[in-house]
Image (cartoon, grey):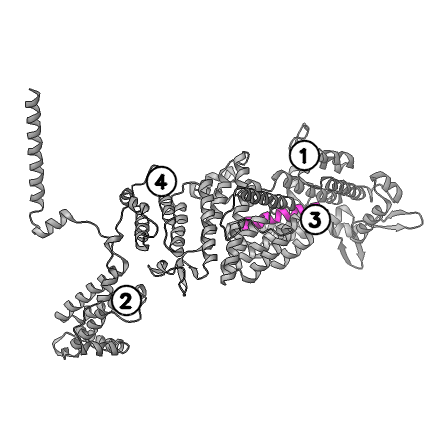
């Protein structure tokens, strides 16, 4: 029973197959037998580039013959131009000076065709094309006249027999992968390796061709190419395969390159350098140039230059990018991040050797790009970190020597100068001489950053002012703008460490003008702005983030900025206590102080802002010891390597600010004179320092007083205005208010197109209002009034 059922099923299946075959034959019934067979047995053939170009030229010539048969000179003219383009491609690929015989034969046919008098039998457009074609052919045949005459003498020459012989491939080169690696090295030929190399390159990106390679589990195209490097017949062929290995490693990456693969790429690049240094006649050319296919078959003792396609600078930039991306993606608080940083000396060694090779070969433009990569890897490192990296590189070299001798031509150890500053000077000088504008700008910013890191504020400031980068930075790319912001932040920290409070505040004020410090420094993305950006924009911002070990501590930066703002704003508020419209030095700290004063209950300080606000409130009351103790309790000061000297400087500045605030507050209202020694005891400052501070205030017309040398006292002058002057100040203030209201009415009437004079008048009115209310800093000279500038 079961056999009977099985037989019926097989009969049904056979009937179904016959029906399908009959249907297929029915659909293909209109095709000739030859075409049907071709459709069933066609295999895709990959033709060499030479064959393809000659085939295109042959097809174009057939079209020209057809145009001559039907007397279509318009189409003949188009195909003739196309034929000349094909000729250029053929001569470029074959690297030949002589035109092919097929082209000469076509010129002879055209010449015979155009010599016939056929204009009367043609239309107007066709006759114009005929005459134009005759002129073009006459001009074109002048350079091939000798070949045309030779062909007319012996027209029986076969077309390109020599080329056909070159294109034919030996059947002995068609070996399998298993057989190829089982053969002796002497038996393996260059064609065998080259054919397998082309198979792998054609299989990249194609699943069908990759299946033919029979890759093992976990094996990649790069592994297959590395196997070919072991049996390469010439150094040039090995070099060509190594370039393809590195290119294959870079392909198909989702996030960042794995560390082991990245190290393989660096080792392969060093192997490439070994080859091109050992064999000086091998020249690595740019990818845009296309050397001959058999260029790598030339032996070692070849007298001429062997050209291999590759770009060392592009590969190095890609390796640096993958190293950078790895540091971005790895958690910085793990040991993996530290281990990743230990690979940096290996990368620096590779970059230095590539720069040396490019300098020897005369490619100074490429060498300047590599020098910039080295500069950007060093500029942010203090001298202690630089010494530690140099020591770690020496230890790795010693471990390599103990493991056994290696045949390395290019040293694997980076060459470090005595200090990071000396190394930076050498690299930056080379970039200034040979680099492009972008490279020079970035090198200048790195140089300024390095000087600021070494507390050379004057040198860094002079370099910034001479470069005028601050004038054109908005027109540069975003990564350069981030580098500029980092440089300004480091410059502000440097100015604070050396005691230049005004300069430090000027450098940091623009960074803190908004609430996007993290974005400006490339150390994060503002969360409250994500809804305004697309996903691609957020992704691009995250790619521009700086690795964690290059970050500038934001808490330290905020503490420095707010401390500088406090030291400048407290005496300014005391000097303009009676002027409600006085110009503030730092709007941020004024806003924070207003918020702090509106609070009903003042809690103990927790954040950096709370500490600075508490110190500001104490300083305005003259309690400089309390203000310093609050600032001294911050933990961020330990990030300064010279913490004690910085805190001593802050303490001295707080005492100076307390003295200035005291004089501004009580000089005109409470005292007619003050003793020098009393001020020195009150603020714990030496008498010479008090004398210097008070004298500067007198010179800057901030304090209307004079010194009484015999008694060592300060005698204050009370400046009183008569009734006429007071009324003049009042009417000036009222007129300015009237002008502002008039301007507002004009703007509302004209739709916002009024004159923008209100702000200017408001600024002018502040001076008069301050003079009327404060009665300080004014001197009467005839009918003119001049006001002193506040510090």
To which residue does mark 1 refer? 635
Left or right, residue 422 beside residue 525? right
Q: Please, what secondary structure does the residue beneath circle 3 have? A: helix
**Which quarter of the picture shows residue 552?**
top right
Q: Is residue 489 above or below residue 279?
A: above
Q: Which mark is residue 85?
A: 2
**Residue in front for this viewpoint, 706 or 194:** 194
**Residue in front for this viewpoint, 554 or 176:** 176
Q: Which mark is residue 502?
A: 3
What residue do we see at 18% from left, 79% from top? 153
First along the sequence among labels 1 and 4: 4
Query: Which x, y percent locates residue 4?
Result: 5, 23
Q: How many residues crowd around disc 1 within 10 Å: few (fewer than 14), some, or many (20 or more)? A: few
Left or right, residue 195 beside residue 379? left
First along the sequence among labels 2 and 3: 2
What is the span of residues highlighted in magenta in the rendered image? 481-497
- How many numbered callouts? 4
First along the sequence among labels 3 and 1: 3
Q: Mark 3 or mark 1: which is in front?
A: 1
Left or right, residue 694 beside residue 42? right
To which residue does mark 4 refer? 219
Q: From mark 3 to mark 4, how far is it between C-alphas?
A: 62 Å
Query: Which x, y percent locates residue 215?
Result: 32, 41
């Amino acid at each position: 029973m079961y056999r009977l059922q099985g037989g019926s099923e097989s009969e049904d299946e056979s009937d179904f197959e016959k029906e399908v075959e009959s249907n297929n034959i029915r659909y293909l019934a209109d095709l000739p037998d030859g075409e049907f067979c071709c459709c069933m047995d066609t295999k895709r053939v990959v033709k060499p580039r030479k064959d393809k170009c000659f085939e295109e030229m042959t097809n174009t010539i057939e079209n020209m013959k057809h145009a001559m048969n039907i007397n279509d000179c318009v189409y003949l003219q188009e195909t003739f131009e196309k034929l000349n383009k094909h000729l250029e491609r053929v001569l470029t690929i074959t690297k030949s000076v002589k035109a092919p015989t097929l082209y000469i034969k076509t010129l002879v046919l055209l010449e015979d065709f155009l010599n016939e008098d056929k204009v009367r039998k043609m239309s107007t457009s066709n006759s114009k094309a005929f005459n134009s074609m005759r002129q073009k052919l006459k001009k074109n045949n002048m350079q091939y006249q000798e070949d045309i005459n030779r062909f007319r003498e012996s027209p029986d020459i076969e077309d390109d027999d020599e080329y056909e012989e070159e294109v034919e491939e030996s059947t002995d080169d068609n070996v399998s992968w298993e057989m190829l690696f089982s053969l002796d090295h002497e038996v393996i030929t260059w064609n065998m390796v080259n054919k397998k190399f082309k198979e792998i390159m054609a299989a990249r990106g194609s699943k069908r061709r990759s299946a033919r390679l029979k890759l093992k589990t976990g094996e990649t195209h790069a592994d297959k190419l590395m196997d070919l490097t072991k049996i390469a017949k010439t150094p040039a062929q090995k070099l060509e395969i190594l370039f393809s290995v590195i290119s294959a490693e870079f392909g198909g990456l989702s996030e960042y390159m794995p560390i082991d693969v990245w190290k393989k790429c660096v080792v392969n690049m060093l192997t490439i350098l070994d080859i091109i240094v050992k064999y000086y006649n091998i020249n690595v050319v740019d990818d845009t140039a296309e050397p001959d296919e058999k260029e790598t078959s030339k032996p070692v003792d070849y007298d001429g230059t062997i050209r291999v396609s590759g770009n060392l600078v592009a590969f190095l930039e890609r390796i640096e990018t993958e190293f950078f991306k790895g540091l971005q993606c790895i958690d910085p608080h793990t040991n993996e991040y530290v281990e990743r940083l230990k690979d940096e000396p290996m990368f620096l060694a590779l970059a230095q050797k590539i720069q040396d090779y490019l300098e020897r070969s005369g490619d100074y433009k490429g060498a300047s790009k590599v020098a910039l990569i080295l500069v950007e890897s060093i500029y942010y490192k203090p001298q202690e970190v630089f010494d530690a990296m140099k020591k770690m590189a020496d230890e790795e070299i010693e471990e390599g020597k103990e493991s056994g001798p290696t045949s390395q031509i290019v040293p694997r150890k980076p060459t470090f100068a005595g200090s990071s500053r000396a190394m930076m000077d050498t690299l930056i000088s080379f970039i200034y001489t040979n680099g492009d504008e972008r490279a020079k700008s970035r090198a200048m910013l790195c140089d300024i950053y390095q000087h600021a890191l070494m507390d050379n504020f004057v040198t860094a400031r002079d370099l910034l002012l001479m470069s005028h980068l601050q004038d054109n930075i908005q027109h540069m790319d975003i990564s350069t703008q981030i580098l500029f912001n980092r440089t300004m932040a480091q410059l502000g920290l440097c100015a604070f460490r050396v005691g230049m409070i005004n300069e430090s505040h000027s450098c940091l004020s623009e960074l803190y003008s908004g609430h996007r410090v993290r974005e400006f420094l490339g150390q994060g993305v503002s969360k409250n702005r994500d809804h305004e950006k697309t996903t691609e924009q957020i992704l691009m911002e995250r790619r521009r983030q700086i690795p964690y070990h290059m970050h500038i501590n934001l808490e330290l930066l905020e503490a420095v900025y707010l401390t500088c703002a406090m030291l400048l704003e407290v005496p300014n508020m005391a000097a303009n206590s009676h002027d409600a419209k006085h110009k503030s030095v730092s709007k941020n700290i004024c806003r924070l102080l207003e918020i702090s004063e509106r609070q009903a209950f003042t809690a103990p300080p927790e954040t950096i802002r709370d500490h600075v606000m508490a110190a500001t409130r104490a300083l305005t009351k003259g309690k400089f010891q309390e203000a310093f103790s609050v600032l001294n309790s911050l933990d961020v000061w330990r990030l300064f390597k010279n913490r004690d000297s910085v805190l001593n400087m802050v303490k001295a500045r707080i005492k100076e600010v307390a003295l200035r605030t005291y004089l501004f507050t009580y000089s005109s209202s409470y005292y007619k004179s003050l003793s020098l020694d009393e001020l020195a005891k009150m603020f714990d400052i030496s008498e010479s320092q008090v004398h210097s501070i008070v004298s500067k205030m007198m010179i800057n017309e901030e304090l209307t007083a004079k010194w009484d040398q015999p008694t060592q006292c300060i005698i204050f002058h009370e400046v009183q205005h008569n009734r006429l002057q007071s009324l003049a100040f009042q009417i000036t203030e009222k007129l300015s208010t009237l002008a502002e209201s008039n301007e507002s009415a004009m703007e509302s009437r004209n739709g916002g197109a009024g004159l923008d004079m209100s702000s200017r008048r408001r600024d002018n009115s502040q001076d008069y209002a301050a003079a009327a209310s404060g009665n300080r800093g004014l001197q009467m000279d005839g009918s003119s009034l001049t006001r002193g500038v506040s510090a």
